[in-house]
Image (spheres, grey):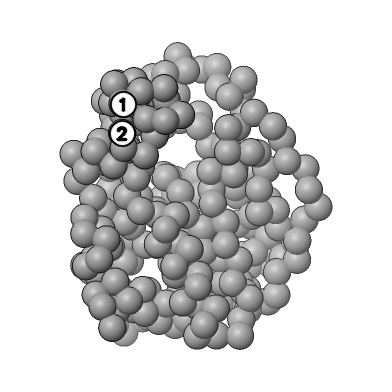
Amino acid sequence: MGRRDEVLAALADAALEVERAHPVRVAVDGCSAAGKTTLGDELADVLRARTPREVIRVNIDRFKRAVAARTRFPQHSPESYYFESWDYDGIRDHLLVPLGPGGSRRYRHELMDFAAVTVLDGPPRTASADAILVADGCFLQRPEIDDYWDLRIFIDIPMEEVLRRGVARDQAWMESAQEAERRYRTKYIPGERRYLDEVRPHERAQLVVDNRDFTAPRLTDRRDPQHRGTP
């Protein structure tokens, strides 16, 4: 078993150890290009192989606020990115609360397309009582939704790696590598630095994955051994 497999197994163990009377809500948090979606997909696969429980996989980018509704700040500013990009009311009311204590378990797995232009108005789904939600996205420990997670995983990479990976990944849809670098330097990275400075998610998460090396990530487990699996 390689280092990545070992880390994924440990993350799956941590999720399975959480005991709730409702679906377990796991946040896979981190900055842009940290590898959140890849790790979330892999973690969901490991969980499905380890347990008969339902595993719900959600990308929080499907809960973005419509671009046309982002009007408080200039669209390409870090403030617009940090404060306006995601629909926190929608994340809370349509996903996290229904899966939480006393919830109906009728949830929505998406509200918008990835471009945040088209509303997706599909019917709600019903989760099993012992389901496990694995949701990945940026800013998942913001105060608007932080209280609704049962386990928080933070994927950590340096900002210079955010820039390198982000430009390589996004230059096609941002028209050029130069434009991608400009957006990361003036919008995404300043917004994410504000999140790191104000919320300090890497210190508050129970589990932190140093994902600089995809093949050999390093896991820091900050859970209290005496209280694992409890609120």
107 versus 171 height, above or below: below
Identify which amino acid the numbered label 2 is placed on.
Val
- The answer to whether mark 2 and mark 1 are in CB contact below 8 A is yes
Position of residue 226 measured from the top left corner of the image (x, y, whole percent): 31, 84
Position of residue 177 measured from the top left corner of the image (x, y, whole percent): 31, 26
| For residue 160, side relative to residue 48 (left or right) | left
Q: Residue at x 42, y 77 (%)?
A: 12
Q: Residue at x 29, y 21 (%)?
A: 178
Position of residue 183 measured from the top left corner of the image (x, y, whole percent): 34, 23
152 versus 230 height, above or below: above
- Quarter that holds the N terminus: bottom left
147 versus 1 height, above or below: above
Does residue 131 show up?
yes
| For residue 86, side relative to residue 172 (left or right) | right
CA gap, disc 2 to disc 1?
6 Å
Position of residue 100 measured from the top left corner of the image (x, y, whole percent): 62, 65
Sequence-first disc among 2 and 1: 2
Does residue 204 show up?
no
Identify which amino acid the numbered label 1 is placed on.
Ala
Quadrant assignment, res 202: bottom left
Residue beneath disc 1? 177
Secondary structure under the numbered disc 1 in the rendered image = helix
Residue beneath disc 2? 167
Circle 2 packing at 10 Å, graded few (<14), some (14-19), many (20+), is many
Quadrant assignment, res 142: top left
| Front one among 109 and 3 | 3
| Front one among 104 and 61 | 61
13 versus 164 height, above or below: below
Circle 1 packing at 10 Å, graded few (<14), some (14-19), many (20+), is some
| For residue 26, side relative to residue 2 (left or right) | right
